Image (tube, rainbow, N blue to C red):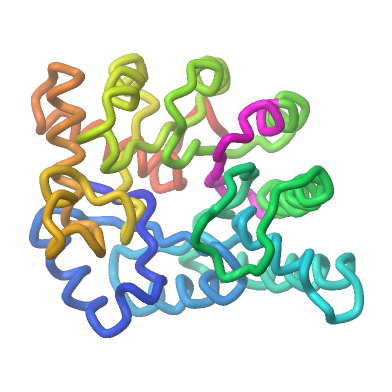
Amino acid sequence: MFDTHCHLNFSAFDGILEKVISEAKNEGVEKFVAPGTDVETSKKAVEIAKKYEGVYAAVGIHPHHVKEIQNSKLKTQNYNLKLKIKEIEKLLTEPKVVAVGEIGLDRHIYQKTKYEDYKIDEEFIALQKEVFLAQLNLAKKYKKTVIIHNRQAKDDLLKILNTYYLLLNTSMVFHCCEPDFDLLDFAKKNHIYIGVDGDVTYDPKKQAFVKEIPLSLLVLETDSPFLTPAPLRNDQKTKFPNTPKNLALIAQKVAEIKEEKLEKIMEITRENGERLFGFKFDLKNK
């Protein structure tokens, strides 16, 4: 199996990372992509990828962390934006960096955040869009896959992608895709992969949505340390952190929903993940 999105670079795995990767490999997870969400976690993803076989990195600035640029007191927003984009660009030359991500747009108001006075207004969304477009340009320049984060910002996202996506000439995935059929239609028309996470084991809307996703577009991801699948999420001891070894539970639920054999789901999603990140040549995306 291939866990196409797991934050092995997050602090939840400090001191236990080797055990976490080993346990996942024992459960049949052969490849992992660890996405960054800011410059520091992107650097950490690269270091982890260098150290562990089968682990690859994605580097990028998550829309939530665009708030750091907006709040910055150091010179101007424009200066800080350029500085951070330049740091992400440097990381893209590392051999095991396979994607720009996770990047995108986010209108969700987070209750838990390190940023004071976190609010969503059009000024913040405009800055998110600027950072998103700058990183899409990097993906185009370096011919890297794009990992898209979208939360409650579908209209903004599709407006940008409708004018920009075909110019990218690269693979893309809707990470932890919201159960929205406008997103699915766009994905089907443009051969964009759709990431399915642990919420498929307990969310009826996500289950109905996954039933409609073509197998050719499905990839599996744990989004570790978040979105622990059922039944583990019901137990305080196993609820957090979610780890890549739990990918098997997601595969099992997808197989059930799709009325397919587990082995088929594991094989197809692994091959889709390999095409997504350029391990296999895909005529539809090259």
x 69%, y 53%: residue: 119
Kindly identify the residue that appears in the image at 89 percent across and 65 percent down.
Answer: 78
Q: Position of residue 106 (x, y in %)?
A: 62, 44
In the figure, 143 relative to 167: above or below? below
Is residue 179 shown left or right of residue 105? Answer: left
Of 248 and 279, nearer the camera is 248
Viewer-side residue, 258 vs 141: 258
Name the spot of residue 135 as percent of width and height, x first.
Answer: 70, 53
Q: In the picture, residue 186 is in which quadrant?
A: top right
What residue appears at the point 29 percent right and 63 percent down from the top-left corner? 54
Q: Magenta span has 5?
A: no
Left or right position of 205 against 192: left
Residue furthest to the bottom: 15
Tell me the quarter of the image containing the C terminus: top right
Q: Which residues are magenta?
A: 141-158
Please provide percent x and percent y for residue 197. 31, 41
Could you say which is closer to the camera, residue 3 or residue 285?
3
Which of the 4 image quarters holds residue 42? bottom right
Position in image of residue 169 (x %, y %): 65, 35
Q: Choose top left, top right, bottom left or bottom right for residue 236.
A: bottom left
- Judge whether 214 appears above or below 66 on screen: above
Image position of 145 with respect to 24: above or below: above
Left or right of residue 73, residue 244 in this image? left
What residue sits 50% from the left and 56% below the top? 98
